[in-house]
Image (spheres, rainbow, N blue to C red):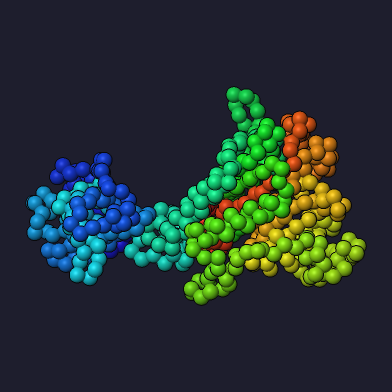
Amino acid sequence: MEESDLLAVRRQKLEQLFQNNQAPFGERFDVDGSIAEVRSGFAEGKSVRVAGRITAHRNMGKSQFLDLSDITGRIQIFISLKELSTEEAALFELIDLGDFLGVQGECFVTRAGEPTVRVRAFRLLSKALRPLPAKWHGISDIETRYRQRYLDLIANPESRKVFLQRIQIVQEIRRFLVERGFLEVETPMMQSVAGGAAAQPFQTHHNALSLDLFLRVAPELYLKRLLVSGFPKIFELNRNFRNEGISRRHNPEFTMLETYWAYADFELMANLVEELICHLAQTVLGTLKIEHKNADGSIRRVINLERPWRRARYDELISSIEPGWFERSKPEKLARCREIGVEVHPQMAEFEVTQQIFEKLVEEKTFDPLFVTHLPADLVPLARQDPDSPGTVEVFELIINGQEHSPGYSELNDPIVQRQRLVKQAGEEIQKIDEDFLLALEYGMPPAGGMGLGIDRLVMTLTGAESIRDVILFPHLKPKI
């Protein structure tokens, strides 16, 4: 049948339900838990109440077998048409795949060994006016998966698995940090100064205050204010917003963990994030060897998270790939970049040219975990200077699967140096400096370690997803034309 015919048939059934005084959109139905919970408590002869969407129907004459499903799983139900009243039989004729059904009955196991509920009573809870996709070829219909995630989650077990794992990962992050004495806090998402990262913000306006505000690009400067106030261990797990490009690794709205630890440094923060990610992999996935697969199911690479993770200095990594790099003049560096296909332009500062080399020749080619340490101060204006290496700061960048997952610092707590760094970064746009943050630093902030962790990228790495859109329930997309 054409889709228009299928829609018409469902509308006709809806009218019949109304004519028969049978509610097509039901009300409260008490259940014994999710489908997974009912299955886990399954016992022969046990009376249960369960509800879900009808996702399969096997018609065997007087014996009808249906699958009820929710995000946690599926369970088979059995209905004997011989046992139905005239009214129940009429209702059953008007039920379709996709409808929500509530049932009450007893548990039994079929001869094929399938846990099943023998239905004694049922109720239509919601009539689906559109049919579910008859066939779902997930990867061949990527656009629909992203735009209509609800259909993706109904029909694609792999998508359900990824998002359930994401939920577990976030829950486990909170538990891990709380058990180690960190307190979860909340800081403003609308800020008068978009600080904490060099990024293009989204702008809005508060009418009552007649005030221009920005959606935050990072929570860092507010979290550091809490270090000033005396919090020893804090974290925030929430959204950041950056009005920049969209790619398979970037979404304008993304989830970030930021953690601060008074009296610690970047090395302790590196230990913390290493322990955290290994704990997540072992707890949620049951392994430290993460397989990333091709579309045909073959293994493309295996990421090894076994500890200890490698640590190496930024300048040493670049010199190992481009010997003598730091002795070259800027024109020589630009020429070398053009020679090897690294995109640069003459207006870039030398540290930016070097960063392009790092991203293309080190970061994108590193798959097992690597802590890149001691970065140039120009790249990280909020970190403490390395006392043994002028021009560098006590920082790590954690690279896994060819992308940055986590930056970590020994935090700069000198208000004088911090002002100098921020003025240099702001250039002529001096209004971008957060004066209240600098004022707070003048009251004294303890030495501290800080760490950020991109949750979306982490979930990509742990689940083997190749696009950030595969791990965000509702990613941003261009409007359909």
Q: Residue at x 68, y 54 (%)?
A: 270
Report x, y in % for residue 94.
19, 53
> Where 217 sits versus 10, above or below?
above
Q: Would you identify the image quadrant in which residue 355 lies? A: bottom right
Q: Closer to the camera, 23 or 409?
A: 409
Q: Is residue 138 left or right of residue 375?
A: left
Residue 416 x, y percent position in the rendering: 84, 36
User: Of 60 and 367, which appears nearest the observer?
Assistant: 367
Q: Quadrant of the N terminus?
A: bottom left
Q: On screen, 31 above or below 83?
A: above
- Residue 350 in percent (x, y) is at 85, 57
Residue 205 visible in the picture: yes
Closest to the observer, 168 or 182: 182
Residue at the image position 58 percent from the left and 46 percent from the top: 180
Quarter occupied by residue 148: bottom left
Residue drawn at x 58%, y 40% as measured from the top left: 183
Residue 427 in view, yes or no: no
Q: Which residue is found at the position 19% from the left and 52% from the top?
A: 47
Left or right: 243 with respect to 287? right
The extreme top residue here reads 208
List x then y, in percent, for residue 358.
76, 62
Which quadrant of the structure image shows residue 39? bottom left
How many labels were placed on the picture? 0
Above or below — where is 201 with respect to 249?
above
Q: Is residue 135 left or right of residue 278?
A: left
